[in-house]
Amino acid sequence: MISHHDLSVFEQYADKVYRFVPLMGGVVEVTEVLKPPREGDAPA
């Protein structure tokens, strides 16, 4: 899913979230948005 909405709207439903930031020269910076584990989640 690609969205311009606030992350809090859908982050609870996503396995992973990535942020894409356009930079000069047509380059795009991609970072994974890490969220803290929810209470009760088993360690990975």
Image (spheres, grey):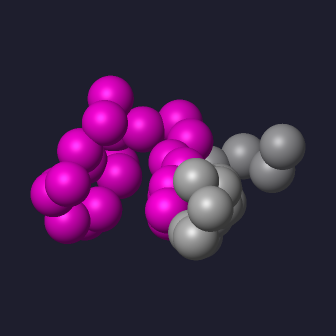
**Toward the viewer: 35 or 42?**
35
Q: Residue 41 placed where, x, y %?
A: 62, 50
Q: Which quadrant is home to the C terminus? A: top right
**Toward the viewer: 20 or 41?**
20
Taking 25 as reference, is 12 above or below it?
Answer: above
Q: Residue 33 placed where, x, y %?
A: 57, 62
Q: Residue at x 50, y 64 (%)?
A: 21
Q: Residue 7 placed where, x, y %?
A: 29, 62
**Is 15 positioned to the left or the right of 41 in the image?**
left
Q: Residue 30 placed where, x, y %?
A: 65, 55
Residue lying farthest to the right in this orientation: 44
Q: Which quadrant is home to the N terminus? A: top left
- Can residue 37 be seen by looking at this rendering? no
**Is 43 positioned to the left or the right of 24 in the image?**
right
Q: Residue at x 15, y 57 (%)?
A: 5
Residue lying farthest to the front in this orientation: 25
Q: Residue at x 51, y 48 (%)?
A: 17
Report if residue 14 lies within the magenta region: yes
Residue 4 placement: quadrant: bottom left
Report if residue 34 lies within the magenta region: no
**Is 9 positioned to the left or the right of 16 in the image?**
left
Magenta part of the protein: which range?
1-22
Q: How many marks?
A: 0
- Can residue 2 be seen by looking at this rendering? yes
Taking 36 as reference, is 43 above or below it?
Answer: above
**Toward the viewer: 11 or 29?**
29
